[in-house]
Image (cartoon, rainbow, N blue to C red):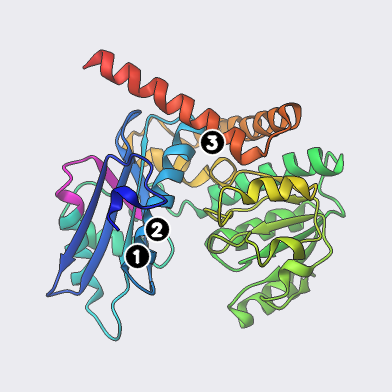
């Protein structure tokens, strides 16, 4: 099967397969859309089972970045990259320098930043070979706190719509991936807001300490779906809402930081059938990419970021309200809005050419 027939291919503009035998680099860079500006999206390094799994991930993630950036009203397109983590020991510096050369081959169509399994130091190594990276040390810094702030504001919207509560005091929230870069910051926000927290993470020592610090209930990572809570906040990897987990959920809303939370687009309708409100992930978790704008232009300062987070909150509310009024799943409504905006941007770009 070629890329063009892949189930997750969505008229991506470019898909680059990069191989460097000397360093062990096996990477895929997917540029979904540059209709509204250069494509931006982080690089994820993961131990994929095979290249087919890596391709599926990068195609879905890059589409999500296009939707995320256009819904956040940013002058950016969407892209993503994944690196198949080499087995055994490898020279990490050399690997990311090779990755930088792969990015540079696209000539500025795609800018990378860090994502799961990649650190700012790794991106700094890539920077030795290309200027097309963001999120560097000394720049806008770690985007995780801003992502977490945006997700927190989105959870407030979800609570208003699903529970009729204007605050989170006493709201039961199950957080998956509680000690991750975003999850830990989110937990602090929720704790300060008075939420009743249930925490799970693969890092058992860290999540145990976090639960002790904030007075939360510790839950086994495989049982977090079974918690009787008000809101489920997935903040780990994607595809956590799937045919094996959806009937285990005992919540009124799903609102978290993870990308591609729905294993398939149809899972949005399945949540709706069960009376569970869904906050489309690429809308609620756009805080990080909003923060990174400061690396591209200094006029996008901290005050601008705060203003954009408020817009993000109102955009999520608009999506949820439209979904309710139209009787459609929230992810379907958000996708429709995003595609319409991308089409409008593409038309403007074509006229200006």
Tell which tag, 1 or 3, sits nearer the viewer: 1
Disc 2 to disc 3, C-alpha distance: 18 Å
Residue 72 visible from this viewpoint: no
Instruction: Tell me the number on the disc at residue 56.
Output: 2
Observer-nearest of 249 and 166: 249
Viewer-nearest residue: 273 or 132: 273
Q: Residue at x 33, y 60 (%)?
A: 82
Cα–Cα gap, marks 1 and 3 = 25 Å
Q: Which mark is residue 52?
A: 1
Which element type, helix, strand or loop, lies under badge 1? helix
* Label ID, residue 277: none
Q: Where residue 97 appears, x then y in whole percent?
A: 18, 64
Classify mark 3: helix, strand or loop: helix
Q: Tell me if mark 2 has few (under 14), some (14-19) or many (20+) residues whose alpha carbon lies within 10 angstroms of its own.
A: some
The residue carrying mark 3 is 335
Q: Residues within 10 Å of mark 1 (few under 14, many from 20)?
A: few
């Amino acid at each position: 099967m070629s890329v063009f027939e892949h189930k997750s291919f969505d008229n991506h503009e470019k898909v680059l397969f990069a191989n460097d035998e000397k360093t062990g680099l096996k990477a895929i860079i997917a540029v979904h859309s540059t209709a509204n500006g250069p494509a931006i999206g982080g690089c994820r390094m993961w131990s994929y089972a095979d290249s087919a799994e890596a391709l599926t991930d990068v195609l879905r993630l890059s589409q999500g970045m296009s939707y995320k950036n256009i819904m956040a009203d940013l002058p950016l397109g969407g892209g993503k990259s994944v690196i198949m983590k080499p087995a055994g020991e490898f020279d990490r510096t050399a690997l990311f320098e090779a990755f930088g050369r792969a990015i540079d081959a696209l000539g500025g169509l795609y800018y990378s930043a860090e994502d799961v399994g990649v650190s700012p130091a790794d991106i700094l190594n890539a920077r030795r070979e290309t200027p097309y990276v963001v999120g560097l040390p000394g720049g806008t810094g770690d985007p995780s706190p801003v992502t977490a702030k945006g997700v927190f504001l989105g959870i407030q919207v979800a609570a208003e719509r699903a529970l009729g509560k204007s605050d989170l005091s006493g709201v039961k929230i199950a957080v998956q991936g509680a000690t991750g870069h975003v999850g830990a910051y989110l937990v602090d926000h929720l704790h300060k807001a008075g939420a009743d927290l249930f925490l799970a993470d693969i890092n058992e020592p860290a999540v145990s300490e976090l639960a002790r610090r904030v007075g939360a209930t510790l839950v086994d990572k495989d049982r977090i779906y079974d918690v009787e809570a008000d809101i489920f906040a997935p903040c780990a990897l994607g595809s956590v809402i799937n045919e094996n987990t959806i009937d285990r959920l005992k919540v009124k809303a799903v609102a978290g930081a993870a990308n591609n939370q729905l294993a398939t687009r149809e899972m949005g309708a399945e949540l709706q059938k069960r009376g569970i409100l869904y906050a489309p992930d690429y809308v609620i978790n756009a805080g990080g990419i909003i923060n990174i704008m400061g690396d591209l232009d200094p006029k996008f300062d901290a005050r601008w970021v705060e203003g954009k987070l408020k817009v993000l909150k109102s955009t999520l509310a608009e999506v949820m309200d439209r979904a309710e009024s139209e009787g459609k799943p929230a992810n379907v409504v958000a996708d429709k809005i995003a595609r319409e905006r991308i089409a409008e941007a593409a038309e403007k770009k074509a006229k200006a050419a």
